[in-house]
Amino acid sequence: MTDVPMTASGSSTATAGEILSRHLTAQAGAFLRALPQAVGEVGSRPGAVLHPSAGTADLLRAVRRIGGVLHTFAASFEPSWAQESRAELRWLLNLLAQEPGYLRRSTRLLGALDSLSAADAEGPGMLAGHAGAPKARALLDRQLTLARTRAHSTVLQELRSARLHALADRMTLLVGEVPLREQAVGGPRDSLLPQTGAALGALDAGARLLPLHRASTPYGGDGLRRLGTVPAARGVLDADAVLAADDAPWHRVRILAKRARYALEVSGRPVPALDELDRTLGRHQEASDAAVTAATAARTPRITPATAYVLGVVHADQRLEVEAARYAFGLQWPDLAPSLAGSGAPPSHPAGGEVPPASRMA
Amino acid sequence: MTDVPMTASGSSTATAGEILSRHLTAQAGAFLRALPQAVGEVGSRPGAVLHPSAGTADLLRAVRRIGGVLHTFAASFEPSWAQESRAELRWLLNLLAQEPGYLRRSTRLLGALDSLSAADAEGPGMLAGHAGAPKARALLDRQLTLARTRAHSTVLQELRSARLHALADRMTLLVGEVPLREQAVGGPRDSLLPQTGAALGALDAGARLLPLHRASTPYGGDGLRRLGTVPAARGVLDADAVLAADDAPWHRVRILAKRARYALEVSGRPVPALDELDRTLGRHQEASDAAVTAATAARTPRITPATAYVLGVVHADQRLEVEAARYAFGLQWPDLAPSLAGSGAPPSHPAGGEVPPASRMA
């Protein structure tokens, strides 16, 4: 993975516009370096990806950062340009993230199944030697490989599209000049502060909506029972809708945590504990997605009861991983939250801890 | 539940023999009072029990205590009498405990299923509205009702047996005179101490064999994955054998905790935290048994995949309860263990905390 140089760390006299420009220029450069490599990687594979590829990972990394910065510091950029750029970056993100996402989900689910059905004397699982385990494994493997192959075909197709070329041109222009609004160009460095503060405030507000009182007791059953209340307007409840509603606020906080991370990176003050929190929320998201895959696979017609039984265990196991990730979040967040309130501030600005209300992120 | 008066609490001049005699006499009296009530309760029910009955509970309570005391203070009693009595009490315990055991298991499993498949807006479960849930519920209910009915018939049959009458006669004699060994009759009160200490030492030794390092981390996966190592001699591993081997040391500690409780009751110094620990281990045992029932039900021929899937979730849910009980034990035990070392001592004997090696209980 290419390391993008951190901006603004050395130059305390730089203006807000200069700091944003340097950061975006560096990220756009990373985008353009990673793009041909990612295209080559995808094009060279006849079928689905078997290993995560460095080019695609670097490209996704730059796409996420540019999109996040355009969102958080929207007030500093030419509005229609920023909006269009974000839409195109989101499109590329959704396109590129799918195939590696299926790969990770496959690794997670097959790994869980192997661990649950391990029959070696050192640490066997509760499904040791179960007849349904190899069948369930084959079913999951088949369905996830199919999904990955489809995602791969879509990427292959879109990599030749005019849309991607237009986005690459957009990034090339960004390396040359960032379309800043006039007042941002010469603004003092501190003018980045309210926007960074807003991103942190949005994360804080999102985290306050989480049922941390539920998640803080181990084995409270959150992942399996007593899930969050669901808006009555949804009509008849089914399990998928219930679980999706229960997970939604956590997925939202994951996006807010990423935006907060990328905003802090702009001022060259990354917070390692926030990266850790982001990883925990990523684990939450992946376990939640894997649980859906297991539940969906169990609805495949004509499977044997033994296969379905094993998929039930795997589904519960992944919901347990969801609960474990929430518990981990509940341990990390209370330590992190107060320190974040001050992290938006540059070293010379001790009063920068005030976090404005999160209205603009709601 | 009848409250059996605690012995020895008021009379500090009583000898060891007097204390043991009084305690056993009181428990044998409780046995004889509860027996006709329990027989009446069982006989008056045409089928399986629907509610736990007070008479049977009182009878079980006395049976457990007499058996435990005869075991722990074996050196004080006439050996062949004590051995025969324990065997007969164990027989009655196994006979009587089955029906209420199935009732509790039914309550636990159907309650878990109802909670997992709850579809109300306030706290739905991960199986909300799942088509397999009512089928799995009906299957579990049918199988457990059948087991309870069978257990009931066995009890009905044995309640008229000569064996039960002989045991009742044995208890009647015990109310009159406890067959103590000569040296115990006049021994000082403190001679109970080494035996109580041995019971506490056996509990401590048993708890030391538990993988508390595994259980102390929430969501370590113990209940589902990375179960304890299984002796290689067992040959081919299947899931039932793996889970049974993983649970065995915990079930053993539950028995040791009960014996320690009953031994402390003899000297009139019950330890409430030990009662709490016993309840936690009881929860562990019941969740472990319920998990086996769910796994067995999933092997019923010709069930639908949806039913099997739901039973897989229920199985994992009960193994999660097993893990939760182990975690609770891991929180309770470290606080309790040091205080137990001194609990064998009567008030006048501050040096009584020394716990002899647990060799006789191994």
Image: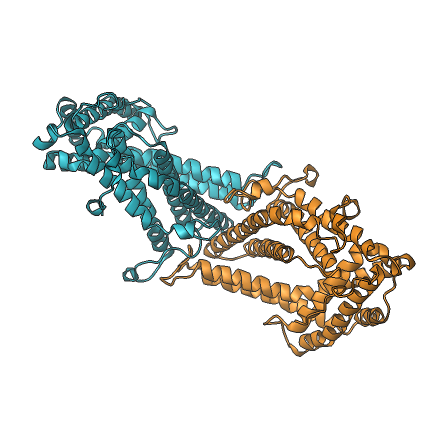
Chain colours: A cyan, B orange
Viewer-nearest residue: B162 or B334: B334
Viewer-nearest residue: B141 or B54: B54
Residue A126, position in %: x, y?
56, 45
Please tell me which residue is depicted at 58% across the width and 47% down the height of the picture: B330
Residue found farthest to the right: B182
Disc count in the image? 0
Residue B142, position in %: x, y?
56, 65
Residue A145 visible, this orientation: no
Please tell me which residue is depicted at 75% across the width and 46% down the height of the picture: B355
Q: Quadrant of the N terminus of chain B?
A: bottom right
**Side of B264 where A76 appears, left or right:** left
**Side of B315 where B100 appears, left or right:** right
Residue B292, position in %: x, y?
59, 54
In the figure, A35 relative to B237: above or below?
Answer: above
Residue B74, position in %: x, y?
83, 56
Q: In which quarter of the image is residue A40?
A: top left
Q: Quadrant of residue A9?
A: top left
Residue B200 visible, this orientation: yes
**Side of B309 where A39 appears, left or right:** left
Viewer-nearest residue: A123 or A134: A123
